[in-house]
Image (cartoon, rainbow, N blue to C red):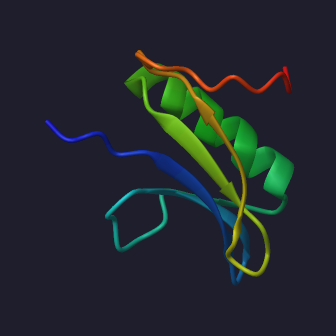
Amino acid sequence: MTKKDVHVVPHPDGWATQKEGASRAGVVVDTQREAIERAREQAQREKVEVVIHRKDGTIRDSDSYGNDPSPPKDKKH
């Protein structure tokens, strides 16, 4: 089974969560903060990564909730 990360992406109606490879949004909400919360809940259940995008589509941040054999060495948390 391939890992399907959850992305937080801009949407015409606000912000959305979207699984990697999906053509449609999972959940559409008003704020990016709300989309991040929903994506984190889903990623924790599925043990995958959350990838947060900016309004222009570039990647802002990511957090792993799975079994990462080589975790990043950053100290942001």
Q: Quadrant of residue 28?
A: bottom right
Between residue 64 and residue 22, name the one nearer to us. 64
User: In this orientation, which residue lies closer to the viewer: 64 or 27?
Assistant: 64
Q: In this view, does 39 lie above or below 60?
A: above
* Viewer-proximal residue among 45 and 29: 45
Eyeballing the image, is 64 above or below 59? above
Q: Name the residue located 86 percent from the left edge and 27 percent from the top edge.
A: 76
Q: Where is residue 34 in the image (x, y as percent from the top left)?
A: 79, 46
Rendering coords of residue 61 (x, y %): 73, 48
- The C terminus is located in which quarter? top right
Q: In which quarter of the image is the N terminus?
A: top left
Left or right: 31 with respect to 61?
right
Q: In this view, does 50 lie to the left or right of 11?
A: left
**Tally of numbered discs:** 0
Residue at figure coordinates x 42%, y 23% from the top left: 47
Q: Where does the image place residue 58, in percent across and percent down from the top left? A: 69, 72
Residue depicted at x 83% and y 21%: 75
- Front position in the image: 12 or 71: 71
Residue 36 rendering spot, x and y as whole percentages: 72, 44
Q: Can you say whether 2 is above or below 55 in the image?
A: above
Picture layout, residue 1 above or below residue 15: above
